[in-house]
Amino acid sequence: MQSETKSKVDQISSSAGHSVSVLRYEGDIASTSKDAVLGAYQALSKETVKLILLDFTKVDYINSSGIALVIQLLIEASNSGQKVAAFGLSPHFTKVFTMVGITKYAGLYPDQATALAAL
């Protein structure tokens, strides 16, 4: 049974004092997650938001449709000149994200502090 995807946006600062938007996901990410994944991202200002963290620590499962949504987000961010890092993926999904080429668009990190330091 798929659990509903939830997302929320937090604003934090990097060690250099830059504003970073953190998209925190919860639940399973699948085709029904478009509003939670893309909607939350697309609500961010492309002009003012330049650094984005994707938090997957509370995500249990991502299917191929969910991965496609994440890729779409990353391509839009790249086209907008935004820098993205992701953290909190299980070892399995870190491997899957690497295999499908997501690392071309976003660094993958074990935790928020490491991801934030890389931005």
Image: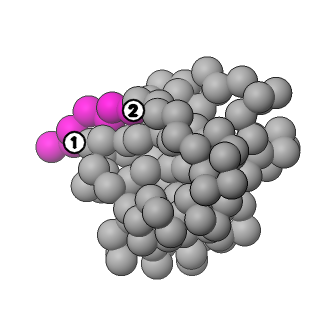
Q: Looking at the rendered structure, which numbered label has been put on residue 106?
A: none
Magenta span: chief secondary structure: loop
Q: Is residue 23 magenta?
A: no
Instruction: Return the residue nearer the eye: 103 or 11.
Output: 11
Disc 2 marks which amino acid? Answer: Ser
User: Split into 4 quadrants, where in the image is the N terminus?
Assistant: top left
Q: Quadrant of residue 50?
A: top right
Look at the image and name its color scheme.
one colour
Q: Which residue lies at the image location 69% right of the left edge and 44% below the top edge?
A: 18
Instruction: Return the residue nearer the eye: 76 or 16.
Output: 16
Relative vertical location of residue 28 with respect to residue 37 in this rendering, above or below: below
Tell whether 107 sits left or right of 57. right
Q: Which residue lies at the image location 43% right of the left edge and 50% below the top edge?
A: 55
Question: How many marks on residues?
Answer: 2
Q: Looking at the rendered structure, which numbered label has been put on residue 7?
A: 2
SS state under label 2 = strand
- x%, y% of residue 40? 53, 28
Disc 1 marks which amino acid? Answer: Gln
In space, the residues marked 1 and 2 are separated at their CA atoms by 15 Å
SS state under label 1 = loop
Circle nearer the viewer, 1 or 2: 2
Q: Looking at the rendered structure, which numbered label has been put on residue 2?
A: 1
Q: Which residue lies at the image location 42% right of the left edge and 71% below the top edge?
A: 110
Instruction: Return the residue nearer the eye: 49 or 40.
Output: 49
Of the numbered discs 1 and 2, the one sitting upstream in the chain is 1
- x%, y% of residue 111? 41, 65
